Image (cartoon, rainbow, N blue to C red):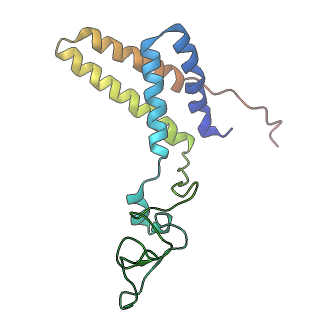
């Protein structure tokens, strides 16, 4: 387990207990925070294109066709469905095979994970204040309860690992 997984693991471990206790604010807060962390790890194709790593977006074995090549016929089943691309036969621009669409998720540092949860906490605080100002006191209190759940996990000190004496 890495340090980045500590906070995420605490949130994941708290979820079943909250579900068993039928603690709605805790369930909602924990699920929301875990989803935000998972979404932050998702592959961003726009970022890959900006960084010039668009080879992750292209199926393996495909090479751009020579635009001056008269033999490239987009209607030919031996070529891609898009003009200008040569490669294995494709149906509607798809790639066949198990895992053909799998892309490695981004790794998050412990600071990034904590930042994501703290952003969730801040969002809940702002939303509760807005709801309070328009007279939605019950809903505002529910959001504050969710905020307290996340705060308790962020402020919780992770268990110390026994790495032995420091030299």
> Does 151 appear above or below 166?
above
Q: Image check: 156 left or right of 44? A: right
Q: Position of residue 39 (x, y in %)?
A: 44, 41
Single out the residue that lies furthest toward the left. 134
> Does 51 appear above or below 22?
below
Residue found 57% across the figure and 58% down from its top: 97
Q: Quadrant of residue 32?
A: top left
Quadrant occupied by the C terminus: top right
Residue found 38% across the figure and 70% down from its top: 81
- Residue in the foreground of this view, choosing between 125 and 138: 138
Q: Quadrant of residue 16?
A: top right
Q: Position of residue 98 (x, y in %)?
A: 58, 54
Residue found 40% across the figure and 89% down from its top: 71
> Does 6 appear above or below 137?
below
- Give the number of callouts: 0
Quadrant occupied by the N terminus: top right
Residue found 57% across the figure and 14% down from its top: 17
Q: Position of residue 12 (x, y in %)?
A: 57, 26
Q: Position of residue 121 (x, y in %)?
A: 40, 27
> Does 28 appear above or below 161?
above
- Residue in the foreground of this view, choosing between 57 and 62: 62
């Amino acid at each position: 387990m890495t340090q980045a997984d500590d906070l995420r693991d605490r949130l994941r471990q708290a979820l079943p207990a909250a579900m068993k206790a039928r603690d709605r604010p805790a369930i909602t807060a924990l699920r929301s925070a875990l989803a935000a962390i998972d979404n932050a790890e998702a592959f961003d194709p726009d970022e890959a294109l900006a960084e010039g790593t668009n080879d992750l977006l292209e199926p393996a074995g495909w090479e751009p066709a020579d635009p001056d090549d008269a033999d490239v016929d987009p209607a030919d089943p031996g070529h891609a469905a898009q003009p200008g691309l040569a490669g294995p036969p494709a149906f509607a621009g798809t790639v066949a095979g198990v895992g053909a669409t799998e892309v490695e998720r981004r790794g998050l540092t412990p600071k990034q994970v904590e930042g994501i949860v703290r952003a969730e906490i801040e969002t809940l605080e702002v939303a509760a204040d807005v709801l309070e100002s328009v007279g939605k006191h019950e809903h505002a209190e529910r959001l504050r309860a969710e905020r307290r759940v996340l705060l308790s996990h962020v402020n919780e000190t992770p268990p110390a690992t026994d790495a032995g004496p420091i030299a």
